[in-house]
């Protein structure tokens, strides 16, 4: 149903081009938020991944709409990439031993097996990527630095999906508040959490409590930011169309998608039948 709804919405909107996604830290550890769009040929992806094994996997599995480069994206300066045994933990920051001691988790995965000096590239300096609609980012602590180096590139975007921590997994790691400060400065505001992972702290008597019943310490999760949604009436028509596509498929904010459709109808871009057809395809639990 999700795939069919995305195709219906795309046909209704008839955007001038596919939705464009930039994926910073594209390590293929699981399904991406934009998977539905990519699977149905409705988006193009420009991805960046500096870990060789992860990059090689991306290249081996890429389709016609995927474009990948082995760059580390950041502030444009050289950095030390701490390559961990668990590839998803590799970071320009060192793992935080205090966090590992408190949580009693991930010691093996966050063990650094090598440190590699790498140049980082600012998104604003790259000519390989076109104007895009969504920035999806997962760089284990370097998100704020990426945003500082992408102020011009992000002017075209309508949404950011970022991994943000609320407690430092890495030494000196900027947390959610730092990301909010950087993004608010260029017009993006927190919209929703896709999820926030929480776990039980280890404590002194770890065998006395059930971990699944005591997941009280928030750690990190995926967060959606939208370009000043209070000014959605001022969005360009093409941007409204891509916002609707992303709101539906990438982060399931159906209210945002319907609002975008309403505005497009007022502009004469779509008819009421398009709105009705879209709402009819939404999950039963979200409609009256």
Image: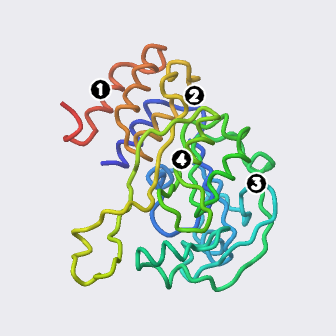
- State which quarter of the image contains the C terminus: top left
Q: How is the image coloured?
A: rainbow
Circle 4 sits on which residue?
177
Q: Nearer the viewer, mark 3 or mark 2?
A: 3
Q: Which residue is mark 1?
A: 276
Disc 3/disc 2 C-alpha distance (Å) = 30 Å
Q: Which structural element holds mark 4?
A: helix
* Residue 257 in picture, x, y percent from top left: 40, 32
**Mark 3 or mark 4: which comes first in sequence?**
3
Say which residue label 3 marks: 75
Q: CA distance from mark 1 to mark 2?
A: 21 Å
> Badge 3: few (under 14), some or many (20 or more) residues near its Cα, within 10 Å?
many
In the image, taking residue 256 as reference, residue 189 lies left or right, namely right
Which quarter of the picture shows residue 276? top left
Say few, some or many: other residues with alpha carbon within 10 Å of mark 4 (under 14 / 14 to 19 / 20 or more): few
| Disc 2 from disc 4: Cα separation | 31 Å
Task: Identify the residue shown where x is 30% and y is 48%.
Answer: 1
- The local secondary structure at tag 1 comes to helix
Mark 2 element type: helix
Query: Looking at the image, which is closer to me, 3 or 254?
Result: 254
Q: Residue at x 58, y 47 (%)?
A: 179
Q: Is residue 11 left or right of residue 28?
A: left
Indicate which disc, 1 or 2, sits on the residue closer to the N terminus. Answer: 2
**CB within 8 Å, label 1 to label 2:** no
The disc label shown at residue 238, or none: 2
Query: Label 3 vs label 4: CA separation?
Result: 19 Å
Which one is nearer the viewer's eye here, 88 or 46?
Answer: 88
């Amino acid at each position: 149903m999700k795939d069919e709804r995305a195709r219906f919405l795309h046909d209704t909107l008839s955007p001038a081009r596919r939705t464009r996604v930039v994926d910073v830290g594209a390590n293929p550890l699981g399904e991406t938020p934009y998977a539905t769009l990519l699977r149905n040929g409705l988006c193009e992806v420009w991805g960046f991944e500096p870990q060789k094994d992860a990059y090689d996997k991306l290249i081996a599995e890429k389709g016609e709409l995927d474009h990948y480069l082995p760059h580390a994206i950041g502030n444009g300066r050289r950095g030390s990439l701490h390559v961990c045994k668990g590839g998803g933990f590799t970071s320009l920051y060192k793992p935080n031993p205090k966090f590992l001691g408190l949580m009693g988790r991930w010691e093996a995965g966050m063990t650094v097996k090598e440190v590699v000096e790498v140049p980082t590239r600012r998104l604003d300096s790259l000519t390989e990527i076109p104007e895009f609609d969504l920035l999806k980012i997962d760089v284990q602590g370097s998100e704020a630095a990426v945003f500082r180096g992408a102020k011009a590139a992000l002017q075209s975007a309508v949404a950011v999906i970022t991994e943000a921590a609320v407690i430092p997994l890495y030494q000196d790691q900027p947390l959610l508040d730092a990301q909010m400060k950087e993004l608010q400065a260029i017009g993006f505001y927190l919209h929703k959490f896709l999820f926030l992972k929480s776990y039980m702290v280890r404590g002194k008597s770890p065998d006395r409590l059930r971990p699944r019943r005591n997941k009280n310490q928030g750690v990190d999760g995926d967060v959606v930011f939208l370009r000043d949604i209070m000014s959605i009436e001022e969005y360009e028509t093409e941007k409204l169309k891509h916002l609707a596509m992303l709101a539906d498929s990438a982060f399931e904010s159906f209210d945002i998608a319907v609002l975008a459709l309403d505005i497009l109808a007022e502009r004469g871009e779509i008819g009421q039948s398009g709105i009705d057809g879209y709402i009819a395809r939404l999950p039963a639990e979200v409609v009256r």
